[in-house]
Amino acid sequence: MFDLSGKVAFVTGGSRGIGRATAETLAELGAHVVLTYVGNEASARETVAAILGKGHKAEAVRLDVADGPAAEAAIADAAKRLGRLDILVANAGISVDALLLRMKDDDFDRVLGVNLKGAIACSRAAIKVMMRAKTGRVIFVSSVVGEMGNVGQTAYAASKAALLGVAKSLAREYASRGITVNAVTPGYIDTDMTTAMTGEARERTVAGIPLGRTGTAREIATAIAYLASNEAAYVTGQTLRVNGGMYM
């Protein structure tokens, strides 16, 4: 598979779900992984312990990516301590679901603050480091909802759709510095965020997936690992859809 030996990866929201699978996968491929968490320190410690237990390298730092200056400081510190930063996976995200007419402005702002502004703050900090090395990989974890929309998820869809435009713009801005910028759009993946959907709602969703099943966090992590690898050196400004055919 892909070889990330000697590389340093910064994965936001890396304590569970897609973030955890990504942290574990990148570490297994040889990267030293710095994963972030907001409130669930126990889960973050468990993830790090699992990675270390397999003989790989990982550490956890507490970070709310919605705090732009804190995000930039955390990435700058990691790069300074570890001597480099090769990969940023901007995965941290939240969803506050409600029909638009019922959504509070504060909730809308919070979703955009974490999912969009947080990802931008992290990419700004990472790119500063990567420019000096003239190489790097920035990967945004967007969502199929950002491409096709979903009832009750206007804020979430807006934030995830915006990341696709950010990826294309940054790809053009920093290609000459050897930095690639791409996005992954997961479909319906079995994570803490989706397990709340049960019964008929879940059945209807799965029925709309041509492959007839939900995806796994590991399948998303593998796609991210590809974009982080040397094998994807000629891939930039792209959206890699991993959704079982849910959106084509």
Image (spheres, grey):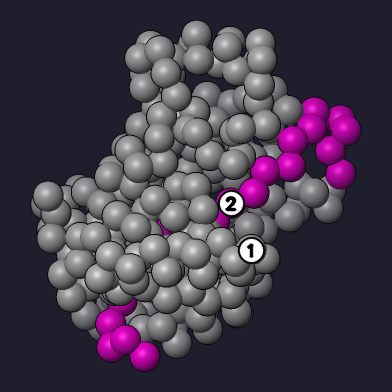
Q: Is residue 112 above or below residue 85?
A: above
Q: Label 2 crowding class (10 Å Cα cut-off): few <14, some 14-19, many 20+?
A: many
Q: Is mark 2 on a helix, strand or loop?
A: loop
Q: Which secondary structure lies at badge 1? A: loop
Q: In this view, does 149 lie to the left or right of 86?
A: right
Q: Where is residue 6, by image quadrant?
A: bottom left
Give the class, few, some or many, for how many residues have Cα within 10 Å of label 1's Cα (few <14, many ≥20): few
Instruction: Tell me the residue that label 2 is attached to.
Output: 93
Residue at point 60%, 79% (across, down): 70
Q: What stretch is highlighted in magenta?
A: 81-104
Closer to the camera in the image, 71 or 39: 39
Q: Residue at x 41, y 41 (%)?
A: 217
Q: According to the image, label 1 marks what residue?
A: 40
In the rendered structure, which amino acid carries the disc numbered 1?
A: Asn
Q: Where is residue 153 in the image (x, y as percent from the top left)?
A: 68, 32
Instruction: Give the residue type at disc 2.
Output: Gly
Q: Residue 28: x percent and y percent?
A: 24, 60
Residue 152: numbered disc: none
Q: Does the magenta stretch include residue 58?
A: no
